[in-house]
Image: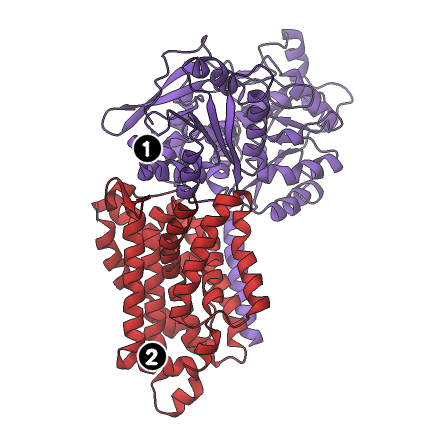
Amino acid sequence: MLAHAILSGLVFGCYFTLVGLGLNLIFGVMRIVNLAHGDVVMLGAFAAFWLFALIGLHPLISSVIVLAAFALLGLPVYYLVVPRLLAARDSEMLSIILFFGVQQIIEALATIAFGTSERSIPGRVLGRGPLHVLGQTLPVAWIVSAAVSLLAVALVYLYLYRSRVGTLTRAVMVSRDEALASGIDVHRVSALAFAIGVALAGLAGVFSPFMLGSATPAMGGDVNLAAFAVIVIGSLGDPRGTMLGGLIYGVALMLMQTYMSAWANLLPNLLLIAVLLVRPTGLLGRQVRRA
Amino acid sequence: MLRRIVVCLLAIACVAGARGAWAQQSRPADERLGGCFDGYLDKAQTAQATAPQPGEPAAPAEIRIGHLHASSGPYASISMPVYLGLKLWVEQMNAGGGVMVKPFGRKLPLRLISYDDQSNPGTAATLTNQLITQDKIDLLIADSGSVLTAVSVPIAREHKMFLFDPTGTGAAFFSKDNPYIALLADPVSTVWPRFLWEFLKSDVAAAGLTRVAILYSTNDFTGTQAAAIRAALKAPGSPVQIVFDQGVPTSTSNYAVLIDNIAAAKPDVVLELGYVGNDIAFLRNLQESGTKFPMVFTLYPGIETSTLLKNAGQAGLSGVFSYVTALAYSYPPEVGMTLEQFRDSWEKSYAKSGVEFGWNAIAGYVTGLVLGQTLACTNSLAQLDVRKAVFSLSGKLKTLIGTFELNEQGAQIGELTPIGQIAPEGKDGIHFTVVYPPAMANGKPIFGTK
């Protein structure tokens, strides 16, 4: 039981890394809190569902389409909303209010458009039968979802640490004002980061029916809570921290389900409180400040 | 900055307003059933009911029905079908001129005031209070499901307002000192699983399957069902042994580890008791994990069959045991539409609503039927008279879900659902074989198929 819980937790944690990654990137670069992140994940789930239901598109192909479409969607949203938000005196607080409104709008429109019933894509689409890993059996759909998540994390890492625009992005992360003073086109860099963040949320949505059972317009709230727990554990603004946070969250969730199942939904809150009390900057917080 | 905050708040308010307007649509329509319940009110009473009596109070312009529903949140998928089923009944009644209201001796139009609590119990409590104190409703109907009904029960009782409870089956709602509630369209949770535990202790045990695992969501609905089953299986002389018994939060969406934990206990029978989302996740994870159990029982394949079939698929449902509701077992109604008629009406009205037709849609319609019969029989709209009228229907009212029967606390003890097993049908379809009780069975259980 313990081995299965830990292994499942690690796989599940990889997926939750992907869920939190976009949120963390947006916060890290722009210092705005995207409360609509979970609802973007939901939109990604419904996009994949409809692409599968209407034209039978494989989720892996859908993921590429969703990634591109959501990135393109993110760009105009950035220019419409974020520059004005960043010009405000307290952009963090204001972003919470603004994106809370956006979240409500997305959920309401999705409910009207899609109805309230659960939707999902058959797990067999990603591969039949369970896989045997280290003596434990895991659904193939989990392994595929985790593999895609790891690939996304790796690509984000390469983008941030092995590309010129990634270097500029990290400069904006460290100090927006200094980046601006040194001639970096902060809005261009931020818009790109915002688009990537939205695209990553959409990508996480594509695999949510496989990891979370089904998708509904109401799923955004729970996804948000998990995503916040993941990025606060790791540290706000650091993708490596998100990976660490995702794995800790996944393993802790599975251990809770195994040994204290009735209390498992308290986990995100407990982890958030524990991290904020013991290490408010997150486990990798110090490194972020010096990045 | 202040301007931006105001704009944000306005945006939020607009969304809430639009949702409210959408939710509160109510149109006037007619009672096709007419007058008091024909089955047990004699002709003299019926004639008396239709003629205005001297000294009667002036008839109101309309009967105001207060109701809550959840258009979003975790309970939307069980709440919206109830709301739309009820709305369909109201529209049908109003289309025929209203519903017969005995105290006023004539038909009156119905006005359905239904607020959206967004699956939030706190909001549901506030809105229940608002319906009673501000909207001055004549009749109060709770939201669907035990979680959202739970908050309305004490408020209705405090205001001495009778609560029509469509599907809130938690046993704690019903007590001898609370005359202001009746459960309409689902059996109370302590009684509902009766056929299940009898089946486990008889046919299943006789087949050598005696080790039972119970996995339930920790809410009033499934928690009470689990407690009732547990008590029955632990009763002296029971041939069944419980080898796994754990609760999980209702928000649980992943069961892979739990399935592994259950398998470690080596049960013959697994009972998974959850809401729609729980059952979907459990059955998908079970199928994907490759784990097999001789018998698996879950609640919602028989309750929201269409939704479960779309999400868990034919392969995921085949062999599973579940309750067999009116969706798959025909009860000839003496009042209201048959299942086929109701399904046709639903499809005409809500085919594109995104809300699936299922048991909860029927429950909403049955709630309307009980309301109509109550108004046709009550001596006044005083709440204790309303209660008396509701209880007078007990054991006599037969709808498309069976016989409406209340115990003295207002808990539904009729409308019991038999136990069935799902078998594949055609390329993607399924059908139920009723396996218990023997008087209703049309086939034998096949163990070891899941």
Please state the horizontal and vertical placement of residue A3, each as a whole percent of the image. Answer: 40, 47
Dot 2 surroundings within 10 Å: few (below 14), some, or many (20 or more)?
Answer: many
Residue at screen point 38% across, 55% down: A10
Residue at the extreme bottom:
A182
Of residue A52 and residue A252, the one placed in the foreground of this image is: A252
Tell me, what hue is chain A? red
Q: Look at the numbered disc 1 and give the secondary structure of its residue.
A: helix
Render colour scheme: by chain
Q: Which residue is mark 1?
A: B316
Please state the horizontal and vertical placement of residue B329, each as a whole percent of the image. Answer: 41, 17
Assign the C terminus of chain B to one quadrant of the image.
top left
Of residue A12 and residue B355, the one placed in the foreground of this image is: A12
Q: Look at the numbered disc 2 and give the secondary structure of its residue.
A: helix
Question: How many numbered dots are placed on residues in this image?
Answer: 2
Res. B299 mark: none
Q: Amino acid at mark 2?
A: Val
Residue at screen point 51% across, 36% down: B83
Q: Which residue is mark 2?
A: A189
Query: Label 2: chain?
Result: A
Vertical placement of residue A46 versus A103, above or below: above
Q: Amino acid at mark 1?
A: Gly
Query: In the image, which lettered chain appears purple?
Result: B
